[in-house]
Image: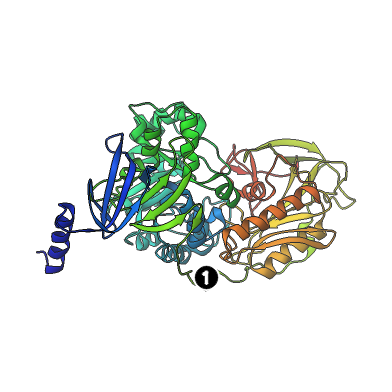
Amino acid sequence: MSNKNDKDILRRKILVASGKKKCELVFRNAKIVDVLSHEIIEGSIGVDNGMVVGIGLYEGDVEIDVKGKYLMPGLIDSHVHIESSLAPPDGFARAVIPHGTTTVIADPHEIANVKGSEGIKFMIRSAKKVPMNIYFMIPSCVPATSFEHSGAVLDAAAIDSLMDDENVLGLGELMDYPSVVAADDKIMDKILTASGRDKLIDGHGPMLEGKSLNAYAAAGVRTDHESSTVDEMRERLRAGMYILMREGSAAHDLKALLAGVTEGNSRRCLFCTDDRQPEDILDSGHIDNHLRIAVEKGIDPITAVQMATINAAECYRLNNIGAVAIGYEADFVIFDDLQNFKIREVYYKGNLVAKEGKAVFESACEDISAVSGKLNVKPFGIERFKLELKSDIARVMRLKAHSLLTEKVQRKIFRDKDGNYEQYPDLDIIKLAVIERHDATGNTGLGLVENFKLQNGAIATTIAHDSHNIIVIGDNDADMYECVNELIKIGGGITMCSKGRILGTLPLPIAGLMSDKPLRSINEKLKEMNETAYKVLGVNKNLDPFMTLAFLALPVIPELKLTDVGLFDVAEFKFTDISV
């Protein structure tokens, strides 16, 4: 039974749409990108109560002349880890909204690995304070593997307790695809928390094919952002999945996948960033960057806009966004042309939120006290970095330029009289350590790295995917020790040291992953530290010093990685000895 208020709202909607009452707001003289009919419509848009009520000749209390510019729906990022921007939702929103993004589907598994359910709740609370749609997928794999120690464990019961929030759309990327294909009890319990509520399940299934891929899809997985080739893309489309085309800071799959887009399958293709660092957002853009790349690669501009808007809305069952049409949110992007997509103004529910590249909204920041605090590291001395070896031949992690992959190589190294690794100045091999920082276990994994090229110092960070322990790399124990103590002192972040002197530090007080400062100031500090890493420490210029280091602890990316438990052979999927 409807109440009087509902009837009054409906009556006004009908009267305004019919032209019998004035709209609150009208956008005049626009070239409207209609993603539903795949055409450009020249005309005006009536908006009332933040929603589109009609396209045609309307009068409004406020009228905005678009002056013949293009107007498209707000852009949608279909899969992003906000934490990769090094800012919480407020800082992230201030960076991406000026690029036309008004909706994101976020997976907060970075902060979940540190702070568990409390971290996820912090992100959800923060998201509700910014003028954009931030929806969440509850992380399915915390910790990511059983070969490391994270700050939390999210079992099915914990996931279930978070699933009913209005901003939660389903279950986050199922990285543990072997357990899914094996019908493991624990992973099935997690899947059922979403499917039992008719909510979505995101995929993460690199290299899956054939019947294994079929089994993955049969479990209810409906998306995948790990396709890097057209063949992988086509197989997943045929399995009934949506393809999330990724263009992030670390992974650049978009150009390769665009070659597989056809008139027949384009509506099952979405855009996503996955992980995008501050510099890339501020310099290259966000989903607007995907649009430029797509059109440059020959995709029809309106098709590209569909991939950036309505396709994602339909995939995630967001029925009132993604189009400029009656009954949809008035999330509009006004821009110059269908090639460069130079964005002039951005509106969210009819309110101006960005103009000429700058955010123009007020928002309240969430209290960070629940997700900050000291690192829980067991007290230790410099001797923790001693690496005892059984032979002069060692397994070494060789870094590859512009890649998160590492090579497993064997190298002749030097040992001191007690059998401990000894740094040899002319040998491009340095020490790596991962120190558990959540439960004071005292765990420290040690390994050796080639091709980082760092000299006379060390770099350390509390961003170490996915469990986010402390990871430190250096050519001498004293500077490594100094870096770790600096991170403990500030409660997490990124730091560098040379000859006992701290060269630069970026504090990340939010779970050791994010800053509470504006994104531009974060980016300025990062740029400064990057320059120092290259010029003073001599880090390989074909590597991003901090992002490369952060991924050396992720034991699901081949070939060798290091966790707080030890050196891990990803191909063999087991721990291995450093000594050969």
Q: Amino acid at mark 1?
A: Ile
- Label 1, secondary structure: give it: loop
Q: Is residue 118 above or below residue 430?
A: below
Count numbered badges in the picture.
1
Residue 226 visible in rendering: no
Camera-nearest residue between 580 and 378: 378
- Position of the N terminus, as image quadrant, is bottom left
Q: Is residue 495 above or below residue 74?
A: below
Q: Is residue 279 above or below residue 341?
A: below
Q: Is residue 84 above or below residue 229?
A: below
Q: Residue furthest right?
A: 417
Camera-nearest residue between 54 and 510: 54
Q: In which image quadrant can residue 394 be found? A: top right
Q: Residue furthest left?
A: 1
- Residue 373 in percent (x, y) is at 59, 71
- Residue 492 in percent (x, y) is at 64, 64
- Residue 510 in percent (x, y) is at 56, 65
- Position of the C terminus, as image quadrant, is top right
Q: Is residue 303 left or right of residue 415?
A: left
Question: At 46% from the left edge and 33% from the top edge, which residue is drawn?
Answer: 294
Camera-nearest residue between 358 and 162: 358
Residue at the disc numbered 1: 368
Q: In which image quadrant can residue 114 be found? A: bottom right
- What colouring does the structure picture have? rainbow
Q: Residues within 10 Å of mark 1 (few under 14, many from 20)?
A: some
- Residue 54 in percent (x, y) is at 22, 49
Camera-nearest residue between 390 and 242: 242
Q: Is residue 548 left or right of residue 27?
A: right
